[in-house]
Image (tube, grey):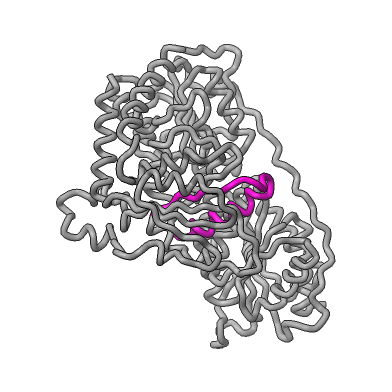
Amino acid sequence: MTATSPELAVAIVEQLIGSGVRDVVLAPGSRSSPLALALAAAERASLLRLHVRIDERSAAYLAVGIARVARRPCAVVTTSGTAAVNLHPAVVEAAYSGVPLVAVTADRPGSMRGSGANQTIDQRDLFGPDVVAAIDVEGMDSGSARAAVARAIRAAVGAHPGPVHLNVPLTEPLVAPGAHGIDAAPVELPARAAVEGDPLGSLLPDGVSSRRGLVVAGDFDDPHTLASAADLADSLRWPLISEPTGNLSDHPRALRHGPMLIPRALELGATPDVVVTIGRVGLHRSVSALLRAAQVHVAVDVPPLLGRVDPVRTATVIVPAVPVAGHDADADESWWSMWHDWDVCAARVIDEELADGPLTGPLVARIVSAVVTEADLLVTGPSWSVRHVSCYAGALKGRCVANRGTSGIDGVISTAWGAAIGHADGLPGATTYALVGDLTAIYDRNGLLVPQVEALPRLVYVVADNDGGGIFSSLEQGAEEFAADFERVFGTPLSADMAELLCAPRIDVMTVDSADALRGELRRDHAGVRVIVARCLPRTDEARLVSALTTSVDAAIT
């Protein structure tokens, strides 16, 4: 027999808990009332943590942040109509990052579709190919609904994890006194089994040596892969270039300023025979040039095994685990020494240029990265923020994550908040830092609106404010030929007080104008959520600095 709406909601929430979901984000609405009341009952019973947000897009990115950092599924629940549609940006990010996001959308009964009924659209298959499973539970009894939820969660955390969609048509009456109680037992999901790699020599064409190679760590977040990548670089004496979210920038073989060394190294003939890339790479154009120049490119498609690890179509072979050096590995210490010496030269130049002076994006990135301890988490925004960390910050001690699936600016504030929640589970005294640009911050400022009853994580946002889209100044559209239209369609200055725009209840917001002031605010112990607006030099000045740093590094490498 078909379940009533309260019965269906209870079955879904109980099975979410029984399938390993510990956090649910709810955006309020009427059609989702049975789900909301069941979630509130589960929260009272300490079976899950409930987070309520008024903006569905922010709610979904909050869930992405929790799921990514906690490495477990997180659900977001909405009402019907455009509320459900607003989940799509976060669903896309989860799809391209392999994040187990569970989108639960309340819906009107199927009989109302096409009738003109209020808030009624066709929500079946709403997210198309961007989910690994889409299930509509209309007409199901409680047992069938439980089985459907369990099936969806298994898909979300499977061999190729990603977002799933549960569409839940609900009929009136939506609520009934005493009908929303929850009886469930939480479970722990098993850890993913480690996969051992093949010997590197078996992956190379005949006649290709492994003496001159490089490891490039792209975007991934798998502990076993981290250890395997470190072992490969150590065994072969290879230099290692790590994007911030590769989380290997503090390895002894890691180059502090690797992406900046590549163009000059290729000019000098230091082309590697083999490049092993791990996870998704492509943050820097110089790395793309390296892949085109190398004789052999071994691409490692690490968990979540999404297959998107060959951005310039140069891979000789794609493998599911980091290769091992093998007993016949032939290391060349002089190859490592050459790259290391170049990196020392680059570090000397950059350290001198960015030692002090007015605030710029590169300097803000260095200052923020320097305060991150091994226990802390760093969340980087897209565009210049992540690239400044990659090129100028040096070794990161703490874990680093970002929305690198599609590198959008649309939900970073909420993702960082969710990341802070997930990070605090294992390290309750740790701090999460989020480095973002001004446009990224205001795009998702609704993510700062949080109910008074919810606890605040230890989270510090640092907003590099140069009044607009800074990265465009360093791209082709920043050339003089496009100056007449640049500010209007690329720079998009707001000429507004960023601190005023980011004010929200219970959140401390302040502005700093110097490096010393920024360091002082970052050192100040403070519980809860803070926003530090770092007022930087104009974008044109920052673009000139970035260009000058590149020129100086090139000149220092001989």
Task: Please identify the quadrant where the C terminus is shown.
Answer: top left
Q: Residue at x 56, y 86 (%)?
A: 118
Q: Residue at x 68, y 59 (%)?
A: 23
Left or right of residue 73: residue 140: right
> Where are the magenta residues, as a range?
410-437
Q: Residue at x 31, y 58 (%)?
A: 467
Residue 479 higher or lower than 14, as above or below: above
Which percent across, then down, holds residue 452?
A: 62, 69
Q: Residue at x 62, y 27 (%)?
A: 197
Residue 344 higher or lower than 500, as above or below: above
Left or right of residue 221: residue 412: left
Which percent across, then down, holds residue 204?
A: 50, 22
Left or right of residue 445: residue 477: left
In the rendered image, is residue 145 in sight?
no
**Is 322 or 421 nearer to us in this picture?**
421
Task: Please identify the quadrant where the N terminus is shown.
Answer: bottom right
Residue 415 higher or lower than 313, as above or below: below
Which percent across, then down, holds residue 11?
A: 78, 69
**Is 481 or 260 nearer to us in this picture?**
260
Quarter of the image where one finds residue 235: top right
Indicate yes or no whether the magenta region holds residue 417: yes
Indicate yes or no whether the magenta region holds residue 416: yes
